[in-house]
Image (cartoon, rainbow, N blue to C red):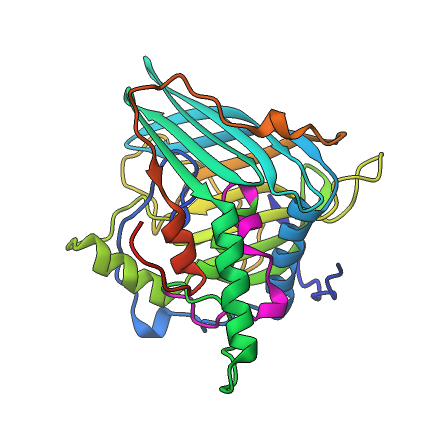
């Protein structure tokens, strides 16, 4: 991934955890950053708007499908995953994401699927199966009630419905999508990046295709929260403290694809010594400050994208043969993220 140098920022037109997770692999480690090294907590306005426009393309644009490829470098090894993604588009909230990662003799799988009413997440890691469910109807109902209450209140409403831990400058109501559309899939991945990282914007190319590059550094408040939750005495070397997202700047020959994510890179704090799998970066060809300073630990590629006719709702309904597995209701976590007080599930 290469960045063009000194290009001005143009105007931009128009079930992942609280911390960004690279699909199956969960990152949660720590490093101490001095106050002098911490960047301002506010993302560049064009970068924030581009992230929002990308989410809008995913959720509100045409239906499409794509292939996924993920490479993960950890514990002295490189593992590769392949998968498929389908987005129903047009605000229906329907999507399907499947990823399979082969790790030696074992196979780890993850499936996220939503029919616009329920999101189901099934993971199988090390032979252990876990299933989670998110009730999108309840999220939508509570969000509408909360917004109505804010609008009717005699006290001036807060500037945002978001109260995410570590989010330094809440997302204004007018600069957000309904929460039911950002529960799961690529839209949630971009949303978590938007909230947890300080973003800047550059122009570049990926395989000769013009792209916009979002470069993010983990917010210091999020950094502190990870440290508090982990209760570790050190920062784990697999926690992504930097991210780069390549977003297509132009459409393909059919007029489709502009504004959609093509490549997402996650970086840890530094290159691990004596790790033969540490991938090289393009630091020699990238102009600061867009150059990541750490070690590339995960790369997600979205490719072979094509516009399709929207699939029927039945295509996005979850079916499982895991009769002995009890699902976990994950709805409350999403309600908490939008600042809604709820009773225990």
Q: Percent x, y for residue 24?
A: 39, 33
> Height in image: 102 above or below 68?
above
Q: Percent x, y for residue 204?
A: 67, 50
The reply to whether residue 15 is visible in this rendering is no
Left or right, 54 with respect to 189, comes to right
Farthest-out residue, top: 105
Q: Which residues are magenta?
A: 166-186
The number of discs equals: 0
In this rendered view, identify the residue nearer to me: 312 or 196.
312
Check if residue 337 falls in the magenta segment: no
Left or right, 238 with respect to 81, comes to left
Q: Determine the residue positioned at 32% across, 61% down.
A: 223
In this rendered view, identify the residue nearer to me: 321 or 61.
321
Left or right, 222 with respect to 150, comes to left
Q: Determine the residue positioned at 33% across, 16% down.
A: 104
Q: Percent x, y for residue 11?
A: 74, 66
The reply to whether residue 59 is visible in this rendering is yes
Q: Where is the N terminus found, in terms of image quarters?
A: top right
> Height in image: 304 above or below 295?
above
In this rendered view, identify the residue nearer to me: 157 or 33.
157
Q: Determine the residue positioned at 41% across, 59% down.
A: 337
Check if residue 169 falls in the magenta segment: yes
Farthest-out residue, right: 254
Answer with the quarter of the image where residue 343 lies.
bottom left
């Amino acid at each position: 991934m290469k960045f063009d140098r000194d290009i001005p920022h143009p105007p931009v037109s128009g079930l992942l955890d609280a911390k960004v997770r690279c699909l199956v692999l969960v990152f949660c480690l720590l490093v101490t950053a001095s106050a002098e090294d911490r960047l301002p907590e506010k993302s560049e306005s064009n970068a924030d708007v581009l992230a929002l426009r990308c989410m809008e393309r995913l959720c509100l644009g045409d239906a499409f499908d794509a292939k996924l490829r993920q490479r993960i470098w950890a514990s002295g090894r490189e593992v590769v995953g392949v998968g498929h993604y389908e987005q129903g588009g047009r605000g229906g909230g329907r999507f399907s994401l499947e990823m399979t990662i082969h790790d030696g003799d074992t196979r780890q799988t993850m499936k996220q699927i939503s029919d616009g009413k329920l999101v189901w997440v099934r993971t199988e890691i090390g032979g252990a199966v876990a299933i989670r469910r998110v009730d999108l109807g309840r999220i939508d109902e509570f969000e509408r009630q909360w917004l109505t209450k804010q609008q009717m209140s005699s006290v001036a409403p807060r500037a945002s419905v978001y109260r995410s831990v570590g989010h330094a400058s809440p997302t204004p109501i007018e600069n957000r999508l309904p929460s039911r559309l950002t529960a799961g899939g690529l839209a949630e991945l971009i949303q978590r990046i938007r909230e947890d990282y300080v973003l800047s914007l550059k122009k570049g190319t990926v395989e000769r295709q013009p792209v916009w590059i979002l470069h993010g550094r983990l917010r210091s408040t999020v950094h502190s929260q990870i440290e508090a939750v982990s209760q570790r005495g050190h920062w784990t070397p697999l926690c992504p403290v930097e991210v780069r997202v390549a977003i297509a700047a132009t459409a393909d020959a059919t007029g489709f694809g502009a504004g959609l994510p093509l490549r997402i890179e996650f970086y840890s704090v530094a290159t691990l010594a004596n790790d033969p799998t540490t991938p090289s970066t393009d630091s020699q060809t990238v102009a600061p400050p867009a150059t990541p300073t750490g070690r590339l630990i995960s790369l997600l590629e979205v490719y072979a994208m094509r516009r399709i006719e929207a699939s029927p709702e039945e295509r996005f309904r979850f079916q499982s043969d895991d009769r002995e597995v009890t699902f976990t209701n994950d709805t409350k976590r999403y309600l908490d993220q939008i600042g809604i007080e709820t009773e225990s599930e």
